[in-house]
Amino acid sequence: MAANKEKAPYSVVSYFCGCGGLDLGFRGGFNYHNEDYPTLPFNILAAYDNEPRCIETYTDYFGEGHASVRDLATTDPEDVPKADILIGGFPCQEFSSCGPLGGLESERGKLYKTLISYMNVHKPMIVVGENVINLERMENGDVLKIIEKDLSAAGYVVKIWKMFAPDYGIPQRRTRLLIMCVRQDVFKKYGFPEEPKASFKNAYRSIEWAIGDLINVTDNSIPNQGDYFAASKAKKGNGQGDESNHKDKPAYTIRANPKSRVQFHYSLGRRLTVRECARIQTFPDNFRFKFSKTVNISQIGNAVPPVLAYQVAKSVANYLNRIGEENDEC
């Protein structure tokens, strides 16, 4: 199915949506740190995750009733809406350097195949997968090669975009793999979306830029700013947690591991608050997290930074709009 201007907004189905970071980037229409991210031409038909609290957080913000709890491992893709685009940050725990490293032998490690099941049935034009950088290192790169091969076998051209978050304006040292797939017939006629431009390369935003205005806020007048784990002092964690950030540099990676993995504020001698973690992940301040600190930090750390997702989504939108313009000229 070729996209055209009349068809916009383009339809999207979201797998493993979590609390909604990737989806927010595709939808757009939010403000982060006094910068507007305009609405993009995507309509999310359905979003799924197996964690009820993630779906509750998602629904509290989006309020559109399209998100639901579902075990995608047992879902028949025929029961899922057909869409132009499939997006999904398939579970990373088995590939993360902080996880059990079960790889493709584990049940969670095989969940990328749920994307392929959908691709085989509905043939979306574009598929956007997301995962951790360690995926390309596992078994000397063989794990990623297997995933690429399986995605290609479904009839898609696959490219990997390695994105270092500070290059795109995210105040956090976080590298992610965006696994971009374009259906072969679409690729043959229109090529591939352009990789987003690294507009902030060598001009990185610091943690102080992201959260400096919160330094005197000690309550929840800004949602979740009063919520943080008590701890004695920062230690050396080799960037993996439990150490102080440097105020003039991007923050350490916000991780899903609560308590000991939550980094310390650059000057206040305490761990980062839930809101500070959300700010560093580029969630807008009106995106609220209402569960325990442990659950909230886990949801934030597992998310795709919305601003990073927005850059990817904008590239996809430009690509589809170009297809529409070329079709209009025919």
Image: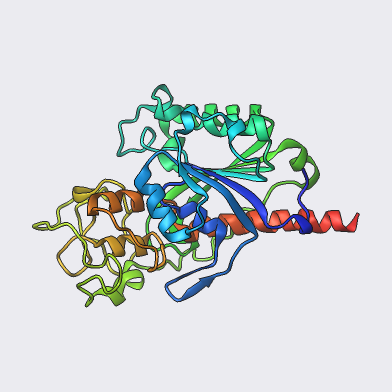
Q: Residue at x 36, y 36 (%)?
A: 93
Q: Residue at x 79, y 56 (%)?
A: 324
* On screen, residue 195 above or below 247: above
Task: Specify whether 171 is left or right of 46.
Answer: left
Image x and y of residue 289, in percent: 32, 58
Name the outermost residue toward the top: 105
Image x and y of residue 50, in percent: 41, 38
* On screen, residue 50 above or below 150: below
Q: Residue at x 19, y 50 (%)?
A: 259
* Residue 248 lies in quadrant: bottom left
Viewer-nearest residue: 311 or 297: 297
Can residue 237 be seen in the rendering of this structure? no
Name the outermost residue toward the right: 330
Image x and y of residue 29, in percent: 54, 67
* Residue 279 lies in quadrant: bottom left
Image x and y of residue 149, in percent: 59, 27
- Look at the image and tell me in which quarter the C terminus lies: bottom right
